[in-house]
Image (cartoon, rainbow, N blue to C red):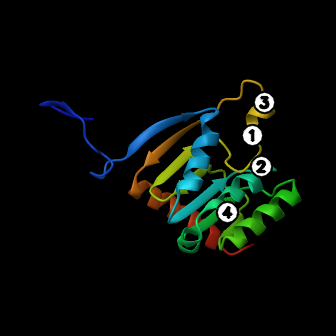
Amino acid sequence: WHCSWRGCQAGDLHSAGHPIVSVVRDHEHESVIRDLLLGASRRVGVASHKLGPKAPIRLASLHDWPQRSRDATALQVVVGSRPEDDAALRDASELVCRMGGNLKVRTGVHAKLVVADDAVLVSSFNPLSADPFGTAENAREVGLLIRSKAVADAGWAWINEQVKVADA
C-alpha cells in the first residue's frame, strides 16, 4: 500500500526500490531461514554468534540447490565464537567448502543475520546454533526480514569483509 494526501493505493513497493519489512517471531525463524536458504539463487551469507550441532543440518539444505544455482551462488559464513562442538564446526566447514564457499570463525562477532539474494534477516536468533526452543522454556526471539537490494548488499558486504580478514 502506498499512502499520500490523495489516499491509499495498493502497489508493489519493492519493485519501486522501497524496502518491505516484516517481523519474524519465535518459531517462525526456522521456516523463514529455510525458505531464504532454499530460495536463494545468487548469494547466501550467514553470520551467527554461535555454531551448534544444528548448523550442519541447516547448511545441508543448500545441497538441494540445483547444480546451476550452486555453481553461480556465492556462499559466505561467519561464526562469532569458537564452537564447543568441534564435530559441528568440522562438518559445517566441510559442507560450506564443498559448496564452494567460505566459513570463518571471527571471535567477537555477535551479529545474527542471513542474507539471501535481495533479502536479509536481522535477528536475535542465532541461525547456526541449536534451536533455543528445545532447551529454554518461554524463549523469545524477534527479527526483521527486510526485502531490499540495498540493505542486502550492505549485509553481504559486511559478511564478505569479515570472511576476508586474515586469521590472527
Q: Residue at x 45, y 61 (%)?
A: 153
Tags 4 and 1 in contact by the CB under 8 Å rule? no
Which three-letter amino acid code belongs to the residue tagged 4? His
Q: CA distance from mark 2 to mark 3?
A: 16 Å
Q: CA distance from mark 1 to mark 3?
A: 9 Å
Q: Position of residue 70 (x, y in %)?
A: 59, 69
Quadrant position of the N terminus in the picture: top left
Q: Secondary structure at mark 1?
A: loop
Q: Which residue is mark 1?
A: 131
Q: Secondary structure at mark 2?
A: helix
Which three-letter amino acid code belongs to the residue tagged 1? Asp
At label 2, counting other C-alpha atoms closer than 10 Å, the crowd grade (few under 14, some 14-19, many 20 or more) is some
Which badge, 3 or 4, is on the more N-terminal residue? 4
80 relative position to 9: left or right: right
Q: Nearer the viewer, residue 157 or 23?
A: 23
Q: Residue at x 46, y 37 (%)?
A: 22
Which three-letter amino acid code belongs to the residue tagged 3? Ala
Q: CA distance from mark 1 to mark 2?
A: 7 Å
Which badge, 1 or 3, is on the more N-terminal residue? 1
Q: Which residue is mark 3?
A: 136
Q: Position of residue 74 (x, y in %)?
A: 56, 69
In the rendered image, which quarter is residue 45 located in?
Answer: bottom right
At label 4, counting other C-alpha atoms closer than 10 Å, the crowd grade (few under 14, some 14-19, many 20 or more) is some
Tags 1 and 2 in contact by the CB under 8 Å rule? yes
Q: Which residue is mark 4?
A: 63
* Label drawn at residue 54: 2
> Compared with residue 114, is residue 6 higher up or lower down, i.e. above or below?
above
Which badge, 2 or 4, is on the more N-terminal residue? 2
At label 1, counting other C-alpha atoms closer than 10 Å, the crowd grade (few under 14, some 14-19, many 20 or more) is some
Most distant residue in the top direction: 138
